[in-house]
Amino acid sequence: MVLALRRLKVYLKLIAIGAVVVIVLLVVAMNRGHTTDIWFFGPYEKVPVLWLIVVTALSSVAGWWVVGRIFGVLRELSAIRQARLVEKQRLEQQRLAQELKDRERQIDEKIRRSIREET
């Protein structure tokens, strides 16, 4: 049963990949001879549609990559802030523990002195 499900999953993936390839080939075939006029900080006439699609796709991928890097840096900055806060809290807890230890030592010393004075 598990093998049949895995086989079905693989075949569905192959069908999806094939469909994507067919769609890409159709887009290329249908737009092969077409041109367009665009305005990108100035008028450009008779720009091939395929080049426009390629440039748009590459700029989209590059933009997505840059945005991902920016969010990664922001995530790292947040992790550094969190680590700094944790370290600050750890140092404060150590300081308080040392103060408590010193107080306990002082109290123990006072109790010992009072026991010695009574005897």
Image: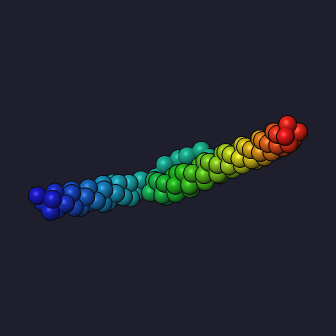
Dividing the picture into quadrants, the one containing residue 25 is bottom left
Residue 49 in the image: state x and y as whole percent: 45, 53
In percent of the image, x 55 and y 46: which residue is there?
A: 38
Q: Quadrant of the N terminus?
A: bottom left
Left-right relation of 113 to 42: right
In percent of the image, x 75 and y 47: which residue is there?
A: 94
Is residue 45 visible in the rendered image? The answer is no
Left-right relation of 1 to 100: left
Residue 102 in the image: state x and y as whole percent: 82, 44
Q: Quadrant of the C terminus?
A: top right
Dividing the picture into quadrants, the one containing residue 30 is bottom left
Count all numbered tags in the image, as a single digit.
0
Left-right relation of 14 to 82: left
Taking depth in this image into account, of 14 and 20 the one nearest to the observer is: 14
Residue 100 in the image: state x and y as whole percent: 77, 41
Residue 103 in the image: state x and y as whole percent: 81, 40
Dividing the picture into quadrants, the one containing residue 2 is bottom left
Taking depth in this image into account, of 39 and 12 the one nearest to the observer is: 12
